[in-house]
Image (cartoon, grey):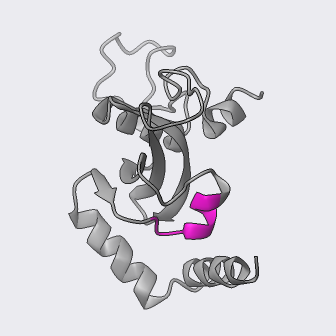
Amino acid sequence: MGMYKYVKENFQKEYKERSPIYRARIAAWNKEAAIVRLERPTNLVRARTLGYKAKRGFAIVRVKTGRGARKRPHPWGGRKPGKNYAYVSPAKSLQHIAQERVARKFTNMEVLSSYWVGENSTTKFFEVILVDRMMCETDLQKGRAFRGLTHQARKHRNL
């Protein structure tokens, strides 16, 4: 795997140095819709290690998620100390939330896994690998993203 090593190093170098290519890519992604289907993965090495294959039945989708905790609009329960807080941290990671959003949109496909591709101050971008259930030769469980069976959800559940 000689080539993959250099591709991986290049991807990491672009992120660490915040290269103009990386910043332009993030700016373009910010203007797009929240869920975008792609022709090929941005980080090929990571996609291949997580099970992506360039053949029929596999799809890559980029998801945009907001960073940070959720802001409560108003303390409706009164101004008691137990109810007077502004931010609520979600119980799931942003990557897990991204996987669930994609699974809701592409109902005929199953989420295989996902990986991080970029972030800025307000948003994080993940690419989700989807597999068509009809084309798949292995038996994928239905609703993997919602039942915590993907790699990221298993990490969150400490399995």
Q: What kind of secondary structure does the magenta stretch mostly adopt?
A: helix
Image point (61%, 80%), residue name: 16
Asked whether 134 or 155 is in front, the reply is 134
Q: Which residues are magenta?
A: 41-48
Q: Position of residue 119 (x, y in %)?
A: 46, 64
**Rendered-image quadrant of the C terminus:** top right
Count the numbered circles shown.
0
Q: Nearer the viewer, residue 115 or 41?
A: 41
Q: In the figure, is residue 36 to the left or right of 156?
A: left
Q: Specify the quadrant of the image occupied by residue 25.
A: bottom left
Q: Is residue 7 magenta?
A: no
Front-most of 21 and 7? Answer: 7
User: Residue 21: percent from the left, percent from the top?
Assistant: 42, 86
Residue 118: x %, y % from top left: 48, 65
What residue is rendered at 68% in x and 77% in y?
A: 4
Identify which residue, 50 or 63, lies in the foreground: 50
Q: Quadrant of the N terminus?
A: bottom right
Rendered position, 5 above or below 120: below
Q: Position of residue 126 (x, y in %)?
A: 47, 54
Instruction: In the rendered view, tell whether residue 117 sits above or below residue 34.
Output: below
Q: Is residue 69 above or below residue 56?
A: above
Q: Is residue 40 above or below residue 35?
A: below
- In this rendering, would 124 be left or right of 34? right
Name the residue furthest bottom.
20
Q: Residue at x 50, y 42 (%)?
A: 94
In the displayed structure image, the side of residue 109 where residue 13 appears, left or right: right
